[in-house]
Amino acid sequence: MKLLFLTDNFPPEVNAPASRTFDHCREWVAAGIDVTVITCAPNFPHGRVYRGYRNKWMQKETIDGIKVIRVWTYIAPNSGFARRIVDFVSFALAGFVASLFVRTDIIVATSPQFFTAVSGCAAGLFKRRPWVMEVRDLWPESLRAVGVASGREWWLDLLERLELFLYRRAASVVVNTHAFHANLMSRGVDPAKINVVTNGVMTENFAARERDEALVAELGPEG
C-alpha cells in the first residue's frame, strides 16, 4: 500500500505537528506501508530555513524509511496574519503540484493549517484517490477564539465555509478529541465519516525511576 501525507511541518522541525506526523509515518513504514511525505523546507518558527536545506522547487530525502519531498514555499515567521496566509496558500499550491507526480493509494492531509487540506482534497480529485482530513485543531475557529483575525471576521466566515466543504469532500475525517467530534456533528458533518483517534504516548521513551521521597514529602500524593 502506498500512502501520501501532506503536512506543512516535518522534522527536523520539532513542533507538535512535525513530531506527531513523524511518529505516525514511522509506524506506518514499520507496518510495511510505502509512505511519502510532501512538506516544505524546515523553517518553523522563525521563518528561516534550517542549515543544510534550501527553499527550492523540489528536494528529496529519506528519513527512517519515509520518502520526503520538500517543495518551495513563501516562507514567513510564525506571526502576523497576512504573510502567514500567503505562506499557507503557497504550500497548498506547491504541495498539490508535487502530489501529481507521486503514486499513491490514499492521501492524508493534516490541519491546521487547513489550506493543506485543500491541497489534499484537490490531489484526491485529480488522482481519483480517497483522501483523509486529519483535524488537529478547529481552524479557523481557533483563530476567531484568540482574536488573530480581529476586524477580519468576513475572512473567517469564508474560511469556515471552505472548512465545511472539505469535511463533506473527505472520505474520512480524523479528530483527536471527542469534543471535536461533537463540534463537527453539530455543524452537519456526517458522523459516519468522523473517527476519533486520541493522542497517545510512545511508552518506550519513558522508564520507571526510584521513588523520590523528597518530592513525595513536598507534594504529598496519596496512593
Image (tube, helix red, strand yellow):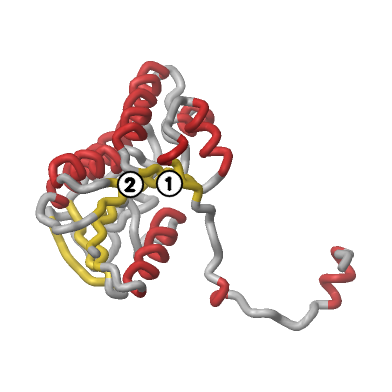
Name which residue lies at 30% across and 41% down.
117
Is residue 43 positioned above or below 66 on the image?
A: above
Instruction: Specify the amino acid type for callout 2.
Output: Val
Provide the residue designation for mark 1.
Answer: 174
Q: Quarter of the image for the C terminus: give it.
A: bottom right
Where does residue 146 sit, x and y in percent of width and height?
52, 31
Circle 2 packing at 10 Å, graded few (<14), some (14-19), many (20+), is many
**Nearer to me, 59 or 33:** 33
Quarter holding the N terminus? bottom left
Against 82, residue 179 (above or below) is: below
User: Disc 1 marks which amino acid?
Assistant: Val
Tell me how many marks there are. Answer: 2
What is the distance, in whole Å, between disc 2 and disc 1 at their CAs? 7 Å
Residue at 57% from the left image edge and 38% from the top image edge: 179
* Residue 109 drawn at (x, y percent): 31, 48
User: Tags 2 and 1 in contact by the CB under 8 Å rule?
Assistant: yes
Number of the label disc, if any, that sits on residue 19: none
Secondary structure, mark 2, is strand
* Element carrying mark 1: strand
Left or right, 212 with respect to 100, comes to right
Question: In the rendering, at what x and y percent does residue 123 appear?
Answer: 18, 44
Relative image position of residue 34 (x, y in whole percent): 24, 67
Q: Residues within 10 Å of mark 1 (few under 14, many from 20)?
A: many
Residue drawn at the location 47% of the way across and 25% of the way down? 187
- Residue lying furthest bottom in this view? 210
Q: Which residue is mark 2?
A: 132
Q: Judge from the rendering whether residue 49 lies leftward or rightward of residue 200; answer left or right.
A: left
Q: Which quadrant holds residue 42?
A: bottom left
Ranked by sequence position, the earlier of labels 2 and 1 is 2
Which of the 4 quarters of the picture holds residue 32? bottom left
Q: Residue at x 80, y 77 (%)?
A: 212
Quadrant of residue 15 within the rendered picture: bottom left
